[in-house]
Image: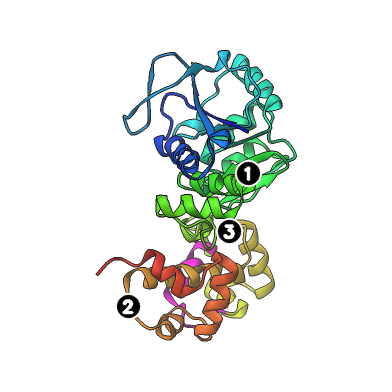
């Protein structure tokens, strides 16, 4: 049985959001009998070519208004300007109808914003690019935005994280359709993993202090970064801020929006990430210099925070020598 996969594009779309999923389903046809082949369709905002964000010209097969069939899978691609774009009521009406007709629908990267503006993410659990997660949560406050997931399924809604995560999602959908062996064969052809270790946190800047730079809390944050090998207890930090421990904890949580202990652990993880990316130092040395009790403690925190071990992180991100 043929399955039709449609991808929606627009001016300024991220080309890899489009070509990544399309290549997964196109390559899958190599391993499927002809009667099970995927049929791929590109839907756009015009009949001519559209310029992607990198300057590449993409050609849609039809204007979105002409796309009235029931697709097996309808995906919305993302793009750098998408969080700020509103395509209007007419398009939103079409998108609501198209997703209602589709067996499955979803988004690549911040294409989730297009779904959100059409009211299609209300009450759903979703993900998007880590850099856009907070904005998506503000745009659609009833949605549960999972900022560290590579992809999320909620019923027949599928959302994915940034750019290449569209490939991860497509392999997942392919495995649902035709089993893990076909998905593995396609992954090998594309030289990618069928399931990557960890989530988006390993790619994003982990430490994001919010305190005003002139506040006592900001000074304590700088103290933490300069003294990672210290104990950094609440008493230590309160003393650095010249406050009582009780008042310090309350003020810090209000201004930084995380607890002091959370900030300290994030700071240690970020420092370790930098060392693992740039230094061949043994793991026990990295752990000591970043304030972990030992290498096992660092491993435990990395697994909990990033979903990968320090050694896996180093293998993924260390600069080539």
At label 2, counting other C-alpha atoms closer than 10 Å, the crowd grade (few under 14, some 14-19, many 20 or more) is some
Mark in the foreground, 3 or 2: 2
Question: In whole angstroms, how far apart are the C-alphas of marks 3 and 2?
Answer: 33 Å
Q: Which residues are magenta?
A: 217-232
Task: Give above or below for 94 relative to 52.
Answer: above
Question: In whole angstroms, how far apart are the C-alphas of marks 3 and 1?
Answer: 45 Å
Q: Is residue 148 visible?
A: no
Residue 228 part of the magenta-drawn span: yes
Q: Which mark is residue 177?
A: 1
Mark 3 or mark 2: name the one nearer the start of the chain: 3
Q: How is the image coloured?
A: rainbow
Task: Give above or below for 32 relative to 227.
Answer: above
Camera-side residue of 307 and 260 = 307
- Tell me where residue 88 appears, x and y as whole percent: 58, 17
Question: In whole angstroms, how far apart are the C-alphas of marks 1 and 2?
Answer: 43 Å
User: Would you name the residue on which mark 3 appears?
Assistant: 256
Most common secondary structure along the magenta stretch: helix
Mark 3 or mark 1: name the one nearer the start of the chain: 1
Task: Give above or below for 264 relative to 53.
Answer: below
Mark 1 or mark 2: name the one nearer the start of the chain: 1
User: Would you name the residue on which mark 2 appears?
Assistant: 280
Identify the image quadrant of the N terminus. Answer: top right
Residue 230 part of the magenta-drawn span: yes
At label 1, counting other C-alpha atoms closer than 10 Å, the crowd grade (few under 14, some 14-19, many 20 or more) is few
- Tell me where residue 61 appears, x and y as whole percent: 46, 19
């Amino acid at each position: 049985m043929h399955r039709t996969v449609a991808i929606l594009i627009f001016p300024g779309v991220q080309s890899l959001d489009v070509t990544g999923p399309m290549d997964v389903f196109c390559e899958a046809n190599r391993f499927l009998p002809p009667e099970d082949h995927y049929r791929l369709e590109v839907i756009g905002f015009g009949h001519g070519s559209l310029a992607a964000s990198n300057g590449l010209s993409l050609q849609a097969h039809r204007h979105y208004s002409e796309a009235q069939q029931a697709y097996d899978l309808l995906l919305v691609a993302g793009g750098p300007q998408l969080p700020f774009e509103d395509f209007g009521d007419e398009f939103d009406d079409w998108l609501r109808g198209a997703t209602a007709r589709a067996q499955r629908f979803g988004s690549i990267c911040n294409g989730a914003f297009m779904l959100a503006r059409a009211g299609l993410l209300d009450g759903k659990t979703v993900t998007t690019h880590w850099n856009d997660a907070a904005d998506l949560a503000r745009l659609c406050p009833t949605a549960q935005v999972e900022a560290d997931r590579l992809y999320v399924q909620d019923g027949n809604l599928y959302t994915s994280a940034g750019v290449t995560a569209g490939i991860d999602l497509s392999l997942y959908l392919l495995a649902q359709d035709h089993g893990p062996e076909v998905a593995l064969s396609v992954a090998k052809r594309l030289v990618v993993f069928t399931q990557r270790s960890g989530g988006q946190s390993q790619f994003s800047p982990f430490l994001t202090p919010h305190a005003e730079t002139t506040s006592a809390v900001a000074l304590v944050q700088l103290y933490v970064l300069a003294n990672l090998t210290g104990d950094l207890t609440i008493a230590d930090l309160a003393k650095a801020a010249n406050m009582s421990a009780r008042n310090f904890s309350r003020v810090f949580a209000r201004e930084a929006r995380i607890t002091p202990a959370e900030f300290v652990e994030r700071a240690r993880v970020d420092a370790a990430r930098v060392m693992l990316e740039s230094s061949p130092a043994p793991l026990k040395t990295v752990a000591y210099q970043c304030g972990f009790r030992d290498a096992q403690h660092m491993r435990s925190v990395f697994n909990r925070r990033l979903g990968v071990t320090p050694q896996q992180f180093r293998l993924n991100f260390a600069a080539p020598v």
